[in-house]
Image (spheres, rainbow, N blue to C red):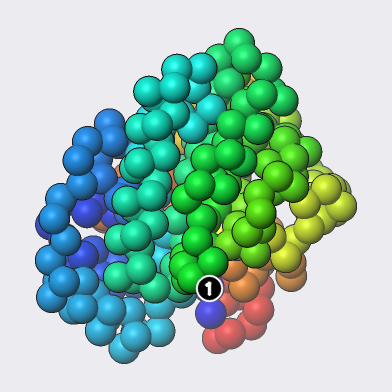
């Protein structure tokens, strides 16, 4: 069965996200740990969390992904901004243990004129301060489009971060299809080649999740503007190849397409049909 969900609003709490996921035939979802500006997280209602855990277990959900605020920059040149990223990640990871054995995804950050090498060292340094041997959460580095001085456009940069992290078994990668495409990897015409490259540089065992998005811009544009499935330069055919690829088809896929719940429901239905057709599940 295809493990698919989408990004959901956490505004109405945890159980509400579980119910929304069920209402659109998703069996996983992604949510922000706090608002994207990185403001203070709301107090967590443990009963609400428990009701979500009941839904997850009852309906055999694939792992969930909590997304860190995308405004965090653990490799900023400003120590106060780095400290803020550190504190948010520490607190988020502590809270994630209420939802054990799931994923926490973050954008590696932008090195802002300090250079890639310095940026990589600062990101790894942050991770070495927040990761704990006893945590059940796997922390995911997201592949980036390469806007400005973003780190994580190429697989080598992500590998270099992992190499510097002491508790590397707590780490994984989330591949965003819009980002890798905009970053210059030809997942439309040469998916096998891209996956072989990923395997050679990072190792496919580290690939834990996929952000499934079409792209409003051509390959190598370094833009990062998501399109609905079939509404961009990647296209439905390539997206279906991704979800049904033997090396990827077991992973959780999260849509981050510009949609409301209804649009997500349609995309999930379409992708489930395509997946089942390829694997002759009907
Ligand atoms: Fe992201
Ligand atoms: Fe993403
Ligand atoms: Zn993006």
- Name the residue at the top extreme: 113
Residue depicted at 53% across the width and 27% down the height: 75
Q: Taking the image as drawn, is residue 265 in sight?
A: no
Report whether 282 appears left or right of 85: right
Residue depicted at 55% across the width and 53% down the height: 140
Q: Is mark 1 within 8 Å of ligand 2?
A: no
Up the image or down, 153 lies above or below 130; here it is: above
Label 1 CA crowd tier, 10 Å (few <14, some 14–19, many 20+): many
x, y (%) of residue 234? 62, 40
x, y (%) of residue 23? 24, 70
In-front residue for pair 194/114: 114
x, y (%) of residue 96? 35, 63
In-front residue for pair 80/277: 80
Up the image or down, 222 lies above or below 229; here it is: above
Residue depicted at 27% across the width and 31% down the height: 37
x, y (%) of residue 28? 40, 68
**Which image quadrant: the C terminus?**
bottom right
Q: Quadrant of residue 176?
A: top right
Residue that mark 1 sits on:
2
Up the image or down, 107 lies above or below 282; here it is: above
How many dots with numbers? 1
Q: Taking the image as drawn, is residue 75 in sight?
A: yes
Q: Quadrant of residue 145?
A: top right
Residue depicted at 52% across the width and 40% down the height: 126
Q: Secondary structure at mark 1?
A: loop
Report whether 40 appears left or right of 215: left
Report whether 14 appears left or right of 89: left
Q: Quadrant of residue 249?
A: bottom right
In-front residue for pair 107/168: 168
């Amino acid at each position: 069965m295809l493990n698919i969900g989408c990004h959901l609003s956490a505004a109405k709490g945890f159980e509400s996200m579980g119910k929304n996921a069920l209402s659109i035939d998703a069996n996983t979802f992604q949510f922000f740990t706090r608002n994207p500006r990185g403001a203070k997280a709301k107090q967590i209602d443990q009963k609400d969390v428990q009701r979500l855990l009941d839904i997850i277990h009852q309906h055999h959900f694939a792992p969930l992904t909590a997304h860190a605020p995308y405004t965090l920059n653990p490799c900023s040149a400003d120590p106060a901004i780095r400290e803020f990223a550190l504190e948010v990640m520490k607190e988020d990871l502590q809270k994630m243990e209420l939802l054990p054995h799931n994923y926490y995804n973050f954008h590696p950050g932008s090195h802002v004129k300090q250079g890639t090498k310095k940026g990589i060292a600062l990101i790894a340094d942050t991770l070495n301060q927040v990761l704990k041997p006893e945590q059940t959460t796997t922390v995911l580095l997201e592949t980036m489009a390469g806007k400005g001085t973003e780190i994580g456009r190429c697989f080598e940069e992500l590998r270099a971060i992992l190499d510097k992290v002491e508790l590397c078994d707590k780490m994984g990668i989330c591949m965003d299809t819009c980002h890798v495409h905009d970053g210059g990897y030809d997942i439309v015409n040469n998916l096998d080649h891209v996956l072989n490259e990923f395997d050679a540089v990072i190792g496919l065992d580290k690939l834990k999740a996929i952000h499934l998005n079409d792209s409003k811009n051509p390959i190598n544009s370094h833009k990062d503007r998501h399109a609905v499935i079939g509404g961009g330069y990647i296209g439905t055919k390539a997206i279906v190849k991704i979800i049904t690829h033997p090396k990827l088809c077991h992973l959780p896929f999260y849509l981050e397409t510009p949609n409301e719940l209804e649009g997500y429901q349609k995309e999930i239905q379409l992708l489930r049909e395509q997946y089942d057709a390829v694997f002759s599940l009907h």
